[in-house]
Image (cartoon, coloured by chain):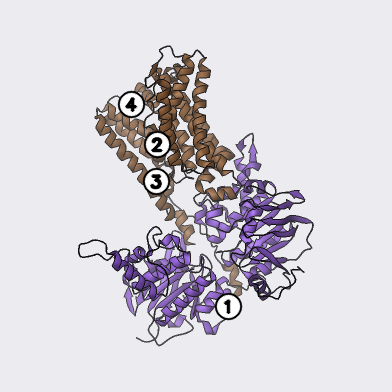
Chain colours: A brown, B purple
C-alpha cells in the first residue's frame, strides 16, 4: 500500500470499527455452554458399559436420591460463589438443622413445624455468616470456617455427642417417601433447582447477585445494595443447608451430630465442576446440577464396580482438581481470545 | 545498503540504515483485517510516535514486535537483516523491550527481586546472593536516574515508580528498541516529566524508542517523527518539523474536527442540582454550586483538587461530613449510590474498568443493570422489554446491535464507555455526573459522547462534567468551576474562557479576585 492521500471525504468510506462475528462453528463458545453436559453423557455411557446394573431404573432412582442432598447444598453454594463468596459451614449447618428438626419432632410438634424449624435454623446460621462477612467486612473464608467449627460444636452439644434415634419420627417421609414413584428428596431437589434458576435468571435480585460477584464496586456505583445482596446469598445457602439437614435426618430417622462432615467441599466441587467461576460473577445453576450428578454417578459407578473406598477417594480428588483446573483455564482464556467472535472484535 | 527499502512510501528518506523496519505487515483475526500491509521503521536515537484511534492497529503491531502475536505476512528487518519474532523470548533476545499499559512486574516482590527476575545472582553455595542483587539493582536504577530503594516492595510504589523499575529492567537488558504504550496514562505531572527526561537520555544514548500515545502534547514534546495508522492501514510517516498537530488529527480520523466541540448554547432553565457547603471534613469543601436544567457545568482543576471527591459525595459513593444536596428543590443528600440514583442522580465514574464495568458480563447486562427495577412484572423480569430498551440506547450511541450478547470486554475503550453511558441514559436520570467521560476513548467515540451530552442538555438534564482535557472541558460546557485544594476558587464562562485562564486559577497563579465569582 502506498501512502494514502489525505482526503476528508474518506470519512464515509471508513469501515466499521467493530468487526463482524466470525462465521462457522465456534467450539470455545459451545464448550463453555454445554461442555459439562457432554462430559456427563460420556460418563454415563461409560458406566452403562462397564458397571453392572447401572442402567436399571432402580439404580438410577437411587443415584438421584443419593445426590439430592449434595445437590441442594450446591444450589445454595452456587449463589454464594456467584457473588464471589464462599461458605464452608454448610455441612455443619446441615447437622444443626437436622438436630433441631428432629428435636422439634420428638417434642411432639407436627411435622411441618419440625421441617420449618430445620429450615429456619439454616436461615439463621446463614444470616450470621452473611452479616459477619458483608457488614463487618470479614473474609468469608475465615468467617465460615469459624461458624463451621462452632456449629459442629453446637450439634454435639445439643445431642450430647450421641445420635438421637426416633423410629417414629413424624417427617421421615421427607427422606424415605415417594411421590408418583419418585423419591421425595429428588422432588425437593428439582423444586429447589427450578426455583434457583428462576431467581437467578428471571428476577432483578438474581442479576444483582451476578453483578456483585462480577465487580462489587461497580455494582455499588450502579445502585445495587451490595451488602444486602452479599448477606442474602449466605441466607439462601443456609436455607438450602437447613433443608438438606431435614432430608438427611428424615432419611436416617435420627439426629446425627456428625452429619454433613465434609459436605461443604463436595458442594463446592459440584459448583466448580458445573462451570461456575470461583472468582464470582460467572456461572449457571444448571451446571451445578450437572456437576452434582457427575459426582454422584461417579461414586455410585465406582461402588457398583467394586472399586475400593480408598481408590474412590483418589478418583474423586482427581476429578475435583480437574474441575478447578478447568475453572482456571477458563479465567485465562477469558483474557485471551477464547472465542473466534471475541478475537475478531478485539482485533478491531 | 543505503536508504530505506520503504523509502517510496514515506515522505522522508534517510541515508542512515534504520534500526528496525517493518514491511508490508498483515495480520488477520478471524474475519477482521487488523493490519493491512502496514509499514513502520525506527532509527537508532529517535523517538518515533505511533498514533491512531483505538482499533487503528497500533497494539497489534506492538504485539507482533513483542512476539505475542505472529504476523500473517510481511517482513521484519533489524539492522537490515531479516528476523523472525515468534515468542516474547525472541523479542528480548533481539533487544526489543515493551513497556505495556499494564505493568509486567510482581507487586508482592521487592524492587531488587523484580529487577533480577530470572537472572538472580547466587553465592558460591548456590544460595540467593541478596547483597549482590541489591547492589546490582542500585546500579540499574541509577542508570535511569530513579531514586528508589531496591529493598522496597514494588506494589507499595506509585505507578510511575513501578514503571521506572520496568524501564530500568529493559535498559539493563541492553534493549536497543524500547516501546512505550501509553506510558503516562497513570502518571502524575512530575512523574511524567521525569519519564520524559529518561526518554530523552535513552534517545541520546542511541536507543530507538516507539512512543504510543493519545496525547498530542506529549507526542509533540518528545517525538522526532510521527506515523499514523487508521483502521489497520498505514496512513503516513512525517517528520515533526513538517506538520502540525491538526494535520496529525486529520490523518488519524480522515476528516476535519473543527466542530468537534460544536455545542448549541441554550438558555438554561431552573436550578436542577443545588449543592451547598458540601464537605468531607478532610480537606474537600465546603463546596457550593448549582447546575440548571439544560446546563453543562465543568469542574476543572488539577488532579487532586477535589473534583472527583466532590462528585462522589454528591452521588453518595462517599459519605460527606456536612452540607446539603437538592435535586429540583427536594433534599437529595444520599448515603449510598442506590439512594442517589433513586433521587435522580447518575454518575459515570472515573475508572471504567474497576468502577463501572462488569467485564465478563454481556453488553446487555452491563447496560441494563441499573434499570431492572423498572422492568419487573410481579417480580419477574420482562426480558423482551429490557432488551428492547437496551437496543434503543445502543442505537442512540451507535453501538452495533450484534454486540448485545458479547462480553463487554470485547469492545474497544470507546465503545465500553458508550455502554456505561447507555446504562444511565436508560435510567433517564435528571442529573448526570460524568467523571472523565472521554479518558482513553478514541476521537470518533469522543465526538459521539459530546453529541450525547449536547442532546441531554437540550432535553433539560443537568450535567456536571469533570475533564482533565482542558479544550474539551471548555468546549463542551457552559460554565467552568475551577477547583483548587478542595475549594471552588473561580467561575468562568466557557464562551470566553481560555485554557490559560483555567490553568492560572487551577494552579493559583492568577491575580486574586477577592473571592468573588463572576460570569
Q: Residue B3 carries which label?
A: none
Q: Which of B202 and B504 is in front in this view?
A: B504
Q: Name the residue beneath numbered marker 3.
A: A327
Which quarter of the rendered picture does the C terminus of chain B lie within? bottom right
Dot 4 falls on a residue whose secondary structure is loop
Alpha carbon separation for disc pair 1 and 2: 59 Å
Q: Which mark is residue A55?
A: 4
Give the class, few, some or many, for how many residues have Cα within 10 Å of label 2's Cα (few <14, many ≥20).
many
Q: Do labels 1 and 3 share a chain?
A: no
Please give the residue where the numbered disc 1 appears in the rendered image.
B245
Q: In this view, does A346 lie above or below B489?
A: above
Q: Is mark 2 on a helix, strand or loop?
A: helix
C-alpha span from label 2 to label 4 = 23 Å
Residues A77 and B371: in front is A77
Task: Please name the residue shown 38% across and 26% down the image.
Answer: A259
Badge 2 sits on which subunit? A
Q: Which of B516 and A323 is in front in this view?
A: B516
| CA distance separating discs 1 and 3 | 48 Å
> In the rendered view of the protein, which quadrant contains the N terminus of chain B?
bottom left
Q: Mark 3 and mark 2: span between their CA atoms?
A: 12 Å
User: Please, what secondary structure does the residue beneath circle 1 have?
Assistant: helix
Residue A284 at least partly seen: no
Instruction: Report crowding for label 3: few under 14, some 14 to 19, many 20 or more residues within 10 A (C-alpha).
Output: many
Left or right of B500? Residue B133 is left
Marking on residue A270: 2
Query: Residue at horizontal 52%, vertical 57%?
Result: B411
Amino acid at each position: 500500500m502506498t501512502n494514502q492521500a489525505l482526503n476528508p471525504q474518506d470519512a464515509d468510506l471508513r469501515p466499521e470499527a467493530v468487526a463482524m462475528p466470525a462465521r462457522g462453528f465456534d467450539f470455545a463458545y459451545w464448550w463453555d455452554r454445554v461442555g459439562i453436559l457432554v462430559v456427563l453423557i460420556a460418563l454415563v455411557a461409560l458406566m452403562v458399559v462397564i458397571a453392572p446394573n447401572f442402567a436399571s431404573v432402580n439404580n438410577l432412582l437411587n443415584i438421584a436420591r443419593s445426590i439430592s442432598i449434595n445437590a441442594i447444598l450446591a444450589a445454595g453454594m452456587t449463589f454464594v460463589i456467584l457473588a464471589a463468596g464462599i461458605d464452608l459451614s454448610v455441612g455443619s449447618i446441615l447437622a444443626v438443622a437436622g438436630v433441631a428438626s428432629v428435636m422439634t419432632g420428638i417434642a411432639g410438634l407436627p411435622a411441618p413445624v419440625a421441617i420449618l424449624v430445620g429450615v429456619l435454623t439454616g436461615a439463621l446460621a446463614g444470616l450470621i455468616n452473611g452479616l459477619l462477612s458483608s457488614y463487618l467486612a470479614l473474609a468469608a473464608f475465615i468467617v465460615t470456617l469459624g461458624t463451621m467449627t462452632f456449629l459442629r460444636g453446637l450439634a454435639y452439644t445439643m445431642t450430647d455427642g450421641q445420635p438421637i434415634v426416633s423410629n417414629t419420627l413424624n417427617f421421615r417421609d421427607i427422606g424415605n417417601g415417594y411421590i408418583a414413584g419418585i423419591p421425595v428428596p429428588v422432588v425437593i431437589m428439582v423444586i429447589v433447582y427450578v426455583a434457583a434458576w428462576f431467581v437467578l435468571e428471571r428476577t432483578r435480585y438474581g442479576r444483582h447477585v451476578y453483578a456483585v460477584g462480577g465487580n462489587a464496586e461497580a455494582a455499588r456505583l450502579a445502585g445495587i445494595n451490595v451488602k444486602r445482596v452479599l448477606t442474602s446469598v449466605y441466607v439462601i445457602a443456609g436455607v438450602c443447608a437447613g433443608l438438606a439437614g431435614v432430608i438427611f435426618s428424615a432419611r436416617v430417622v435420627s439426629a446425627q451430630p456428625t452429619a454433613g462432615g465434609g459436605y461443604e467441599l463436595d458442594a463446592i466441587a459440584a459448583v466448580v465442576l458445573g462451570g461456575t467461576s470461583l472468582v464470582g460473577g460467572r456461572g449457571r445453576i444448571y451446571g451445578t446440577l450437572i456437576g452434582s450428578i457427575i459426582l454422584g454417578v461417579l461414586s455410585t459407578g465406582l461402588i457398583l464396580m467394586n472399586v475400593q473406598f480408598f481408590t474412590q477417594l483418589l478418583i474423586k480428588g482427581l476429578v475435583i482438581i480437574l474441575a478447578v483446573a478447568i475453572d482456571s483455564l477458563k479465567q485465562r482464556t477469558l483474557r485471551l481470545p477464547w472465542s473466534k467472535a471475541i478475537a475478531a472484535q478485539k482485533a478491531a | 545498503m543505503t536508504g530505506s527499502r520503504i523509502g517510496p512510501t514515506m515522505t522522508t528518506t534517510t541515508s542512515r540504515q534504520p534500526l528496525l523496519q517493518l514491511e508490508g505487515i498483515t495480520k488477520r483475526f478471524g474475519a477482521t483485517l487488523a493490519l493491512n500491509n502496514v509499514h513502520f521503521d525506527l532509527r537508532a536515537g529517535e523517538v518515533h510516535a505511533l498514533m491512531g484511534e483505538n482499533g487503528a492497529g497500533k497494539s497489534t503491531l506492538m504485539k507482533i514486535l513483542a512476539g505475542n502475536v505472529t504476523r500473517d505476512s510481511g517482513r521484519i528487518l533489524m539492522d537490515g537483516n531479516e528476523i523472525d519474532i515468534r515468542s516474547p523470548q525472541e523479542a528480548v533476545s533481539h533487544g526489543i523491550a515493551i513497556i505495556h499499559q499494564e505493568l509486567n512486574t510482581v507487586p508482592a516482590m521487592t524492587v531488587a527481586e523484580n529487577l533480577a527476575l530470572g537472572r538472580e545472582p547466587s553465592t558460591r553455595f548456590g544460595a540467593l546472593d541478596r547483597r549482590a542483587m541489591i547492589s546490582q539493582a542500585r546500579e540499574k536504577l541509577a542508570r535511569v536516574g530513579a531514586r528508589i530503594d531496591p529493598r522496597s516492595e514494588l506494589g507499595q510504589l506509585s505507578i510511575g515508580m513501578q514503571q521506572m523499575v520496568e524501564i530500568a529492567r529493559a535498559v539493563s537488558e541492553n534493549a536497543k528498541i524500547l516501546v512505550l504504550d501509553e506510558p503516562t496514562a497513570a502518571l502524575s505531572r512530575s512523574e511524567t516529566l521525569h519519564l520524559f527526561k529518561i526518554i530523552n537520555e535513552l534517545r541520546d544514548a542511541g536507543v530507538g524508542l516507539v512512543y504510543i500515545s493519545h496525547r498530542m502534547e506529549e507526542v509533540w514534546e518528545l517525538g522526532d517523527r510521527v506515523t499514523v495508522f487508521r483502521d489497520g492501514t498505514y496512513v503516513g510517516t512525517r517528520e515533526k518539523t513538517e506538520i502540525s498537530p491538526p494535520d496529525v488529527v486529520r490523518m488519524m480520523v480522515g476528516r476535519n474536527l473543527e466542530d468537534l466541540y460544536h455545542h448549541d448554547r441554550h438558555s438554561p432553565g431552573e436550578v436542577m442540582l443545588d449543592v451547598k457547603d458540601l464537605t468531607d471534613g478532610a480537606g474537600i469543601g465546603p463546596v457550593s454550586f448549582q447546575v440548571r436544567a439544560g446546563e453543562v457545568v465543568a469542574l476543572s482543576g488539577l488532579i487532586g483538587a477535589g473534583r472527583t471527591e466532590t462528585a462522589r459525595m454528591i452521588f453518595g459513593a462517599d459519605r460527606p461530613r456536612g452540607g446539603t444536596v437538592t435535586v429540583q428543590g427536594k433534599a437529595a443528600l444520599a448515603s449510598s449510590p442506590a439512594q442517589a440514583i433513586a433521587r435522580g442522580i447518575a454518575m459515570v465514574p472515573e475508572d471504567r474498568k474497576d468502577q463501572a464495568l462488569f467485564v465478563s458480563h454481556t453488553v446487555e447486562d452491563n447496560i441494563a443493570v441499573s434499570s431492572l427495577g423498572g422492568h419487573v412484572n410481579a417480580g419477574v423480569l420482562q426480558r423482551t422489554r429490557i432488551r428492547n430498551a437496551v437496543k434503543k440506547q445502543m442505537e442512540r450511541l451507535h453501538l452495533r446491535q450484534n454486540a448485545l450478547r458479547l462480553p463487554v470486554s470485547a469492545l474497544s475503550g470507546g465503545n465500553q464507555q458508550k455502554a456505561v453511558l447507555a446504562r444511565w441514559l436508560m435510567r433517564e436520570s435528571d442529573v448526570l455526573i460524568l467523571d472523565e467521560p472521554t479518558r482513553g476513548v478514541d476521537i470518533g467515540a469522543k465526538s459521539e459522547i459530546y453529541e450525547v451530552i449536547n442532546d441531554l442538555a437540550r432535553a433539560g438534564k443537568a450535567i456536571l462534567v469533570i475533564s482533565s482535557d482542558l479544550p474539551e472541558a471548555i468546549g463542551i460546557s457552559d460554565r467552568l468551576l475551577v477547583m483548587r485544594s478542595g475549594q471552588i476558587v473561580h467561575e468562568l464562562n466557557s464562551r470566553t474562557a481560555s485554557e490559560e485562564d483555567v490553568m492560572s486559577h487551577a494552579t493559583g497563579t492568577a491575580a486574586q479576585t477577592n473571592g468573588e465569582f463572576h460570569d
